[in-house]
Amino acid sequence: MEAINVGLVGITGYAGMELARLLAVHPSMRLVMACSRAESGKRLGEYYPFLEKLPGCDVRISQFTPEEVKEKCDLVFLAVPAGKAMQMAPKLLKAGVRVIDFSADFRLQDKAVYEEWYALPHEAKELLAEAVYGLPELYADKIAKARLIANPGCYPTSIILGLTAACKHDLISSKNILIDSKSGTTGAGRKPNLPTLFCEVADNFRAYGLVRHRHTPEIEQEISKLLATPVTLQFTPHLVPMNRGILSTIYAELKDPAMTAEKVWELYHETWKEAPWVRVLPLGKLPETRFVRGTMFCDIGLALDKRTKRLIIVSVIDNLCRGAAGQAVANANLICHRPMDEGLSHTAPLV
Amino acid sequence: MEAINVGLVGITGYAGMELARLLAVHPSMRLVMACSRAESGKRLGEYYPFLEKLPGCDVRISQFTPEEVKEKCDLVFLAVPAGKAMQMAPKLLKAGVRVIDFSADFRLQDKAVYEEWYALPHEAKELLAEAVYGLPELYADKIAKARLIANPGCYPTSIILGLTAACKHDLISSKNILIDSKSGTTGAGRKPNLPTLFCEVADNFRAYGLVRHRHTPEIEQEISKLLATPVTLQFTPHLVPMNRGILSTIYAELKDPAMTAEKVWELYHETWKEAPWVRVLPLGKLPETRFVRGTMFCDIGLALDKRTKRLIIVSVIDNLCRGAAGQAVANANLICHRPMDEGLSHTAPLV
Amino acid sequence: MEAINVGLVGITGYAGMELARLLAVHPSMRLVMACSRAESGKRLGEYYPFLEKLPGCDVRISQFTPEEVKEKCDLVFLAVPAGKAMQMAPKLLKAGVRVIDFSADFRLQDKAVYEEWYALPHEAKELLAEAVYGLPELYADKIAKARLIANPGCYPTSIILGLTAACKHDLISSKNILIDSKSGTTGAGRKPNLPTLFCEVADNFRAYGLVRHRHTPEIEQEISKLLATPVTLQFTPHLVPMNRGILSTIYAELKDPAMTAEKVWELYHETWKEAPWVRVLPLGKLPETRFVRGTMFCDIGLALDKRTKRLIIVSVIDNLCRGAAGQAVANANLICHRPMDEGLSHTAPLV
Amino acid sequence: MEAINVGLVGITGYAGMELARLLAVHPSMRLVMACSRAESGKRLGEYYPFLEKLPGCDVRISQFTPEEVKEKCDLVFLAVPAGKAMQMAPKLLKAGVRVIDFSADFRLQDKAVYEEWYALPHEAKELLAEAVYGLPELYADKIAKARLIANPGCYPTSIILGLTAACKHDLISSKNILIDSKSGTTGAGRKPNLPTLFCEVADNFRAYGLVRHRHTPEIEQEISKLLATPVTLQFTPHLVPMNRGILSTIYAELKDPAMTAEKVWELYHETWKEAPWVRVLPLGKLPETRFVRGTMFCDIGLALDKRTKRLIIVSVIDNLCRGAAGQAVANANLICHRPMDEGLSHTAPLV
C-alpha cells in the first residue's frame, strides 16, 4: 500500500501540534508538508523538539502556497483561523486536493447565520452545500464521499454526542436545553496573550463568552436536525486551569415525567454499544476528562432528577484529539477509505 | 479593650487551618484553645509550621472537653463534621459559651429536611428555632443577638448572594432556577482519600453529587425565603483542579421578557453599593475566583440573554474564607459587638 | 505469531496503571492476569474506566497466587513494594515464569548495601547475582538472556543515562558529582496520604529525603561501574506540582579544564546518535519534562561553565513510562526476542 | 500621624501588582500615583478588579513624569526593567524624592560587573556608591539613612538569607558553593510570551539560564562580603509550574568534617531567633514554599551529609512579597522611620 501524502497548514497552534504528533505514528499517512508563516525554514523537529527521532521530524516548514499543496499532497488539513480557510479551500479543491478544515468556515450551512455570529462576509458560500460536517458517528457515509470536511468544533462535539441518544429516542423537550461547558486552556489557543499566561490561569476559574459564544449556532444546527425542529438553547463555556479536556453538563427537560434513569441508560447503551469511541458509563458513575485524555473517546454519564424532571448528561472529550486533530484524522481515514480508527487506537497518560 | 478568648474545635481540616491563620492576626480575638483528637499534644506551630513566630503558635493542641471550653473561651468555633456539632453545641451553650458551627447541623430549619438529606436523626432539634443562619448581608441584626450561629455552606453563600438582588427586585421566576457550581479542591476536605490525591485531580475536571448534593435544601430554604414562595431548584457541583474558590453560574428565567441588562445591573448595583464585601462588576466583565482569593469578597457578573430570556448570574467567592472561616469571624465580630470587618480587611495574593 | 501472555501483580499503583495502558495496545503481548488484594473481583475496565472498550478491559482482577501465574503467564510484572518482590520472585522463577520486578529488591548487587538503605533483611540473596539491571541502553544483551530483571528506579534511569557519555569518554572527575533531581507527584505513589493530597502539593514545591534517599546507592553502583572506580555522590530529590516527569540537574567537575562545550556535545552526540530513545539537544537548548511525557525518550541538555569548570547535564524522562512501566515493556520485549521498541513507539500529549 | 504619600512606576507587572495589594492595607502609606504607559487613563480598580472597594482603587493610572512624582510623592517605587531605573532615579533624587528600585541597576557595586552581565552601559554610576542593598536583616541601619535603595533580587534574597549564618559562623568553605534554585512562574514576568502560557508551563518542569543567570554576580557580591573573600559559585535556576515561591537548595562543603547537624542548627537558631521573618526549622523538617506564600518569611531547613561532608541548606521565600514588593515596603518603612514590619504582619492562604 502506498502512503497517503498529507499536508498541514497551521503548524504552530495546539491543534496543529496535536495533528503533527498523531501523524508521526499513523501507519498509512505521511506528513509531507507543514506550513507556518512565522516558522518557515525550520525543520519540524527543531521547532517541536518532542518530534525529534520520529517520522516527519525532517520536514522543512514552509510558507503556504497552493502550488506546493498540489504538487505534494493528496489531502490537506487546514488549522487556520476562521476567515482564512474560506480563502484557501476553493483553490485547493480546484487543484484536486481534498480538504479537512478545522475552522468554522464550512460548519454552518446557513450563510446568514455564519455572517451574524462570525461578523465576516462568507467568501466561499458556493461550497457550503457540499461541505460535510465531520462528525463520524453521525455522518460517516457522507464523509467517505466528501471532498471538503468541516471538522466540528470542540464544544459541539462533546454536546452533540452527549445529546444524540436522547434526541433519537425522543426523551427530551426541544425547549430549555441548557449546556454549561468547561474547557481546558488549550482551547484558548497558543497565541501569546495576557489572559492565558500561566499565572493568570493557574488556581483560577472563570466563565467567558456568555450568551454569544460562536459555537452556539453550530450546536443548535445539529441538535435541530436531531430533534427535527428548530432549537434555541443556552450555552455557556468556562475556562479550567488544566491543559486539555472538555466537560459539558447538559440539562434537558424530560418529555415523559415518569421516565426512569434505568430506561434512559438502556437507550443510551443501545445507541452506542457498537460505537468504538463512545462509552456510556454505568448509572452512578460520572466521567472525568482525564479518562479520555489524548484519545478519541467520548465518555457519557447520566443522571435523572425526579424532583425537577430533568435529564442531566455529563459528556467529556479531549478537545485537541477528539475535538480537533484526532477527529480530523478519522475523517481523513474515511475519505481515504482506510479503517476509521487507523492511527487512533492509542492510549495516553491519564495521570 | 480586653481580648476575646476563642476556641477552635477541629484544627486539622482546611476550614480550621484557614481560621487559625485569620485569628493569628485578628486585633481583638485570641485563640486560646485548639482541639484535635489526632494531633493532641503538639504545639500549634509544630503542627502548622506556617504559624511559627505568629500569635497563637504556642497554643498546645488538646482533646475537646466542654470543661476546657468553659474555662477558657468566650466563644467557640466548631469545625467538625455534620452529626458531631449537634452533640457538642447543647453542652457548650449550657456552659454559657457562644457557638459558631461550621457544619450543616443547624442550617436547615426543618428537622425533616435535615434528616432526609443528611440521613441522620437530629439530636438537638430544640436548638433549630434559635440558631441563626450566619449570612451577614441578610441577617446581621439577628446574628448580633444570637448564641448559636449556623455558619452557611460554601456553595449556598455564593448562590444566595448571587441571587439576592434578583429575588428582592422580583426579576426572576421561581421556576427553573438552575445552578451549575464549580469548586476548588479544598472543598473536598483534608482527609487522605484516593480521589483527592494530587495526581487524581490535577489536569482533570469532573462533576459530582448530581441531583443529591446536600447543599441543595439549604439553598432552596434561603431562596424560598427571598422569593416568598417554595422553590425547587437544580444544583450541580463540579471539582476544579485548583485549591480555592467557588464559581456559581446561575440561570434564571426573567419575569419580564423586555427587561434589559442595564436595568438589571442598576438594581444589583443599588442593592450592593454600600456592602463592603459584595462587588457588582460592570456589564461585560466577568468575575474570576482569584480576584476574591483569601478574602470576604463576593464578586458578581451579569449577563442577559435576549434569545432565551434568561438572566445569567456568575458569582464567585473564596470557599474557605468567605465560605467558611472568614464568614465565621464576621459572625463572631457581630456577636461580640466588634466591627463586622475587623481582622477581615486584608488582601491576599491573587496570583 | 502467538501472543505472549503476561501478568501484572500490583494493578492499583501508578506504575501498574501505566503498564495496563501500555499493554492494552501492545501488538504481541496480552494481559491475562491482573492482581490486587484490595480490588480483587472487579473487571479491570470497571476499576479503570479509561480501559473500557480497550483490549484487556474484561480481565477479572484476582488475588495473587503463584498457581495462577504458572497456569496463565509466560512472563509476569511485579509492581509491588520493596520487600514483597523478593518473596514472590523465587516461586515464580521456580514455576518457569520470567519476572520483571519494578521494586528495588534485585537492583543492588551488594546485599549489605540493600539491607543498610532499605532496612530490610534480604530474603532472596541467591538471586542477586543472576538478576540483570534492566537499563536497555547499557545491558540489552544480558537482558535478552535473563530470567529475572531488576527494572531500574526512575531517578537512576534519568541520571545514569545523563552521565553515561561523560563517564565513557572520561570527561568528568569521580569526585563531587552532585545531582539535584525533581520529580512529578506520581513518583510519590497512589496510596492516600495527607502530603500528596492535591491541595498540599498544588502551587507548592519542596525537597524531601535529603542525604538518605534510597536511590542513592543504586546510582552510585552504576556510575561506579561506568567510571570503574567507587563513587560517592550527592543526590537530592524534590517534589514538583505536576503529575509526571523527572528532571535531573547533574553537576560534575571537568577533568580537562580546557574542555569545550562543543567537544562535549560531539561526544554525547556520537554516543547516542543511533539510540532510538536518547536525544541530545543542540547546545543552547534545554530539555523539558513535557517533551518526553508518556514516552521512552530521555532528552539531554548540556552546558559547560567556564567560570567553575563544571559540566552541567540536564536530563529528563517520564518517570512512569521510561522510569517504570515502559522500561519494563522494553525489557519484556528483549526477553521475549521481540523488537525492543514494540508497543513503545507511540507519542503522547505534550500539552 | 500624616500619611506617607507613595508612587509606583510600573503597575502592570507582578511585582507592581503585589505592591498595589500590600499598599492597599498599609496603615501609614497611601498610594497616590500609579504609572503605566499602556494602561494610562484607567482607574486602578478598573485595571485590577481585585482592588475595587479597597483604598487606592480610585487612583487614576498616569504616564510617568518626574514632575508628577515631585508634586505628589514622598517616596517612589520603581518596578521597571533594568536600564530604565538608572535613567529615572537621578531625576527623582534631584527632586528630593526617595527611591526604592526593584531592578538590578543599583545592586552591583562594581560598574564593570553590571555592564558585563547586563550587557548595558551604566548611565548613573555616580549613584552606585550611595545606593544601599535593601536586605533588612543585613543592612537595616544603612537602609534607614538611604535615599536610594537597590531592592534585592528574588533568588539572591533566598540564597543570602540561607547562607548568612553559615558564613558568619565560618562553617563552610568558600569553594564549591553550588545553588540549585527553583522559582514559581511569576518570576518570569507578566509580558505575554509563548513560553509562559499556561499550557506551556503546566505539568512541565525545566531549567533555564544555565551558567549565565544575571543574579549570579549579585549573589557572589553578597556572599563574598559575608565570607570576606572573593567567591565564585554555581547558580542554576529552574521554572516550577506554580505561581509563587522560590526554593533554593544550597550545597556547601563543611570546613570542619567533624561538624554535627545539631551544632549547625544551634548556630542557625542563635543567628535568627530574634529575627521576625527568618524561621529555622527543627532538624528533620524541610521548608515548603506554600508556608511562606504571600509573606515576608524566609524558612530554612538544614541537613548535614556525613558521607559527603556537605551542609545542605534549603531556603524558601515568596518571590513577589519577600523577594520584591514586601521587601520594598520593609525598606520604605525603615527609610520613613516606621516599624520595619508595618503593613507586613499579615498571613496569606497557604492552600
Image (spheres, coloured by chain):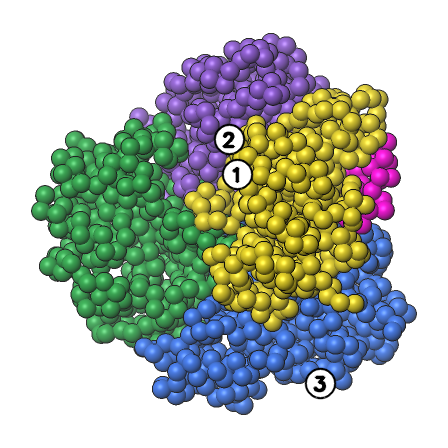
Chain colours: A yellow, B purple, C blue, D green
Residue for point 66% across, 15% down: B175
Q: Splitting the image into 4 quarters, where does residue D28 fall? A: top left
**Residue furthest bottom as drawn:** C228
State the residue position of label 3.
C142
Q: For mark 1, what is the residue?
A: A205
Magenta stretch bounds: A263-286
- Left or right of residue B113, residue D172 in this image: left
For the point 13% across and 60% down, which residue is it?
A: D125
Q: Is residue A351 left or right of residue A283?
A: left
Contact (CB < 8 A) between labels 2 and 1? yes
Magenta stretch containing residue A283, yes or no? yes
Residue position marked by numbered label 2 in the rendering = B316
Q: Crowdedness of circle 2 by 10 Å Cα count: few (<14), some, many (20+)?
A: many
Q: Position of residue A344 (x, y in %)?
A: 73, 56
- Between the C-alphas of marks 2 and 1, the distance is 9 Å
Describe the element under mark 1 as helix, strand or loop.
loop
Farthest residue, direction right: C71
